[in-house]
Image: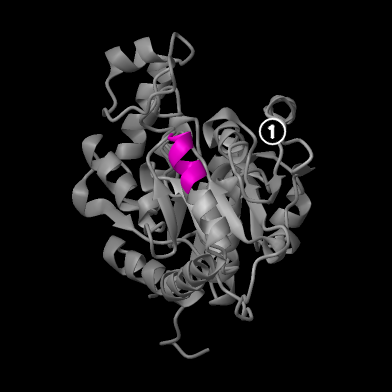
Amino acid sequence: MNAKAKKQKRLLYVSEKAGFYGGVERYIYDTAHTLKNAGWEISMMYAEEALDAKGFLALFDKSFRMEDVDAVIAEEDFELVMILKVTAAEIVSKLRLAFNVCVCVSDHDYYCLRHHKYFPLGRINCPLPSNLFYCTLCSLGRGRILKYSALLNEIRKCGSFIVLSEFMRQNLLKNNFPEKAVHKIYPVCPVKEIKPRKAFSKPPLIIFAGQLIRGKGVDLMLRALARLKSEYRALIVGDGKDMDFLKKLASELGIADKVEFPGRHDDISEYWEKADIAVFPSRWQEPFGLVGIEAFAHKIPVVGFDVGGVGEWLHNGKNGLAVPAKDVTAMYVELEYLLREPREAIEMGEAGYEFVEKNFSPEKFVRAMNCLLKETGGNNV
């Protein structure tokens, strides 16, 4: 082999779950697939298996259990280790002392003891940085404060950090993460060629995709749907502990005949292809909101609450309509508007598609990761 040839870049993802569990695991899978196609060697370290772990792990060149971290350190060499969700400070400490470690901060877990970033009473979003005294009170004793503090301290010592939105960058800065070490790198969302939409379905189809938990705000969406005067159908695609509550609420609101709950599906392409409007009703401060750009990739406009990092991709009046957090009346008004103005909705969907095509391509993600390696001292770039 040519002595000047570059050695294959080696990246280790580290996260609690291996499998298709939620947004973090989808991010891992999609970005790992992108980097592997670009010639990187991709490995995974995990603590437990989740849905379709076998299929998930088949993508990776190597996989390791988190309990074997010492053996991995002794036997393997990685240009970069990317930590996503880890709960043990000891694991972070061992990895950062052995490798070039980057933490992808994809949610609020590391600096919010309750994880949700809203107060327990009324689910009012919290704008404050981490504070051991107040966070302990806010968590109502549910968190282990010493374990939480130790983990946050170890995470802060890592070499670099990836965030998906300016909102998350500001959160890290408020929580005393080093500014120069924080890098905003958009995720991957490749687009397929889609024919221009000419008209809405009859009746128009409104879609939500995600976990059915209170923070995702599907109950708020249902209350907005119940006020619509225009005809529509709705799909609530996903699963979670709120499923029965939401079905009961739809019945109480008198819209059970218009709302379908098809459950969880790993590939929801068939639903996107049929949908006309997507709703993003989260009440918690979404770090980014990957499902929003997935809707755009199918030329679907989004009506969503303007919380957290949603404004990074939802540009009011251009690719969708942003409404104030938890404002059910505003959501109803904007949904009614798009149902009555399908031509404008279709134009917004086209704008969303162009936005994703420009900003979330695999090529752009690979370039950003190469730049990160150069800046953090990774080899063979």
On the question of residue 379 being in view, the answer is no
Q: Amino acid at mark 1?
A: Gly
Q: Residue furthest bottom?
A: 2
- On the rendered structure, is 55 left or right of 10? right
Residue 250 image-quadrant placement: top right
Which stretch did the figure color magenta? 327-333
Q: Residue at x 58, y 54 (%)?
A: 278
Query: Looking at the picture, how far across and down is residue 104, in whole percent?
Result: 42, 49
Direction from residue 226 to residue 162 in the image, left or right: left
Closer to the camera in the image, 37 or 285: 285
Query: Is 222 located above or below residue 97 in the figure?
Result: above
Q: How dense is the environment of label 1, judged by Cα within 10 Å: few (below 14), some, or many (20 and up)?
A: few
Whole-percent x, y for residue 306 in the image? 39, 45
Q: Determine which quarter of the picture holds residue 245.
A: top right
Residue 250 placement, left or right of 165: right
Q: Nearer the viewer, residue 94 or 164?
A: 164
State the count of labels: 1
Residue 81 in picture, x, y percent from top left: 46, 54
Please determine whether, in this image, residue 239 is positioned above or below residue 128: below
In the rendered view, tell whether residue 73 sits above or below residue 123. below
Q: Quadrant of the image for the C terminus?
A: bottom left
Of residues 22 and 275, which is closer to you in this image? Answer: 275
Q: Position of residue 139 (x, y in %)?
A: 42, 15
Identify the colour scheme used: one colour
- Where is mark 1, residue-wise? 240
Q: Is residue 281 magenta?
A: no
Q: Considering depth in this image, is 254 or 155 the residue closer to the camera?
A: 254
The residue furthest front is 229
Provide the major secondary structure of the magenta segment. helix
